[in-house]
Amino acid sequence: MSAITRDEVAHLARLSRLALTDDELAHYATQLDAIIESVAKVAEVAAEDVPPSSHALPLTNVFRADEVRQSLTPEQALSGAPAVEDDRFRVPRILGEEA
């Protein structure tokens, strides 16, 4: 038995202020009926002992913990730079702003 009829689709179209032809009403009734049947099948499979979830597999944090480690000194980091100024990389001015 159909879960949604052509008349119900016409009623929904009127409420939504949509002008649908008879062919469109029949087409949408068929599509909506298929959607409702699919949702009903999913509802049948859902068991009481299975909690709702957003993912099929549990998610875990994949980030590593922040740890303080030995790093480069400013001199080592800037050693390969073509130009250095005040312990920073010096780059060409691109916006034409005055210093």
Image: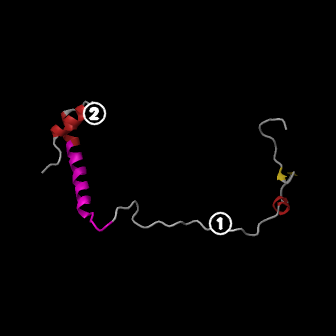
Residue at mark 1 to residue at mark 2: CA–CA distance: 54 Å
User: Which of the two discs, 1 and 2, labels the residue nearer the N terminus?
Assistant: 2
- What number is the disc on residue 3? none
As drawn, 97 above or below 36: above
**Tag 2 secondary structure:** loop
Residue plotted at (53% across, 66% down) = 61
As drawn, 48 above or below 81: below
Amino acid type indicated by mark 1: Asp
- What number is the disc on residue 16? 2
Residue plotted at (84% across, 35% down) = 98
Residue 38 picture location, percent across and down: 25, 55
Circle 2 crowding by C-alpha within 10 Å: few under 14, some 14–19, many from 20: few
Residue 21 picture location, percent across and down: 21, 32
First to last magenta residue range:
29-50
Q: Which quadrant of the view contains residue 4?
A: top left
- To which residue does mark 1 refer? 66
Which secondary structure dominates the residues rendered in magenta?
A: helix
Residue 33 picture location, percent across and down: 20, 48
Q: Which quadrant of the view contains residue 80?
A: bottom right
Q: Which residue lies furthest to the left in this view?
A: 1
Amino acid type indicated by mark 2: Ser
Residue 94 picture location, percent across and down: 78, 40
For residue 91: magenta?
A: no
Residues at circles 1 and 2 in contact by the CB criterion of under 8 Å: no
Q: Which of 34 and 44 is in front in this view?
A: 44
